[in-house]
Amino acid sequence: MSILHNIYFHSSSKILDTLPQDELPEVCFVGRSNVGKSTAINKITNKKKLAFSSKTPGRTRLINMFNIVEQKNHKTIGYLVDLPGYGYANLSNQEKIDFEKNLTKYVQYRKSLVGIILLIDMRRGITSLDNDFLNLVNSKPITIMLTKADKLNHTERLIIRKTTTEKLIKFKNITDIVEFSATKRIGISEVSDIINKLIT
Ligand SMILES: Nc1nc2c(ncn2[C@@H]2O[C@H](COP(=O)(O)OP(=O)(O)OP(=O)(O)O)[C@@H](O)[C@H]2O)c(=O)[nH]1
Ligand SMILES: [Mg+2]
């Protein structure tokens, strides 16, 4: 069994000050609203409703932390973090500014953040917001998850994977690019292995 299956809801925070102490390794899931972050966390942890997903963008509005517990001694060994998505239209300008500040601060200053999973909708490709995010973080390892791969056929997937890889080559901290589908269960073990190595 993957260590990521033994996981529990830990906390929800609106601001960074109330996050758990910055000490155990954590891996966060970021990306545009509706890209599939919460769904991916549920698939990777083999839980139906650990993180709340929804058809409507903007479902996750808080920083949700899930603690991974080692089975032998029942100790928390790290966290998965579900972040609100960026590019959510239904926010006021001030809310957008606050959100960006919060996200920037979190990824740049959170010492215990050992890796970032950046989700990109495979049909959309890299958007300007994804580019902005990638320019913001150059000091942490990033795994790109190309989500909703089930919506494309084999040839489309090959082409998009190639063009996306070319566009991302300049970001030296991207360690992996993984195609993912929650519905067709593509890429689950690959991403789980990557997270496992980052946490342990
Ligand atoms: N076809 C398909 N649909 C998916 C996949 N992953 C997620 N979805 C759907 O996409 C929608 C959004 O999923 P969420 O997991 O809530 O997205 P999110 O990134 O957490 O969204 P926010 O919390 O708004 O930032 C839901 O309707 C999911 O069922 C996938 O791999 N394939
Ligand atoms: Mg979500």
Image (spheres, rainbow, N blue to C red):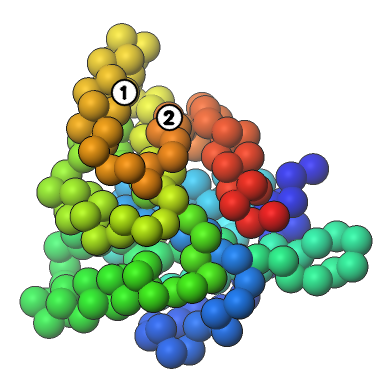
In the rendered image, the vertical position of residue 183 relative to residue 31, given as above or below: above
Q: Is residue 102 left or right of residue 28?
A: left
Say whether residue 66 is visible. yes
Question: Nearest the camera: 122 or 118?
Answer: 118
Q: Is residue 105 above or below residue 58?
A: below
**177 lies above or below 35:** above
Q: Residue at x 47, y 60 (%)?
A: 28
**What residue is pinned by disc 2?**
179
Q: Earlier in the sequence, mark 1 or mark 2?
A: 1
Q: Position of residue 81 (x, y in %)?
A: 50, 64
**Image location of residue 75, percent across then percent down:** 80, 71
Q: Quadrant of the C terminus?
A: bottom right
Numbered disc 2: secondary structure: strand
User: Which residue is depicted at the point 57% across and 33% down?
Assistant: 190
Query: For the residue marked with disc 2, what is the amino acid?
Result: Glu
Q: CA distance from mark 1 to mark 2?
A: 8 Å
Task: Classify residue 56 as left or right of residue 112.
Answer: left
| On screen, residue 146 above or below 166 | below
Residue nearest the viewer, comparing 132 with 71: 132
> For this view, does 54 lie left or right of residue 121?
right
Q: Which residue is mark 1?
A: 161
SS assignment at label 1: helix
Quadrant of the rendered structure where residue 170 is? top left
Q: Residue at x 27, y 33 (%)?
A: 169
Q: Determine the residue positioned at 63% across, 72% down.
A: 24
Contact flag, marks 1 and 2 (Cβ < 8 Å):
yes
Q: Amino acid at mark 1?
A: Arg
Image location of residue 3, percent across then percent down: 74, 51
Q: Position of residue 132 (x, y in %)?
A: 18, 55
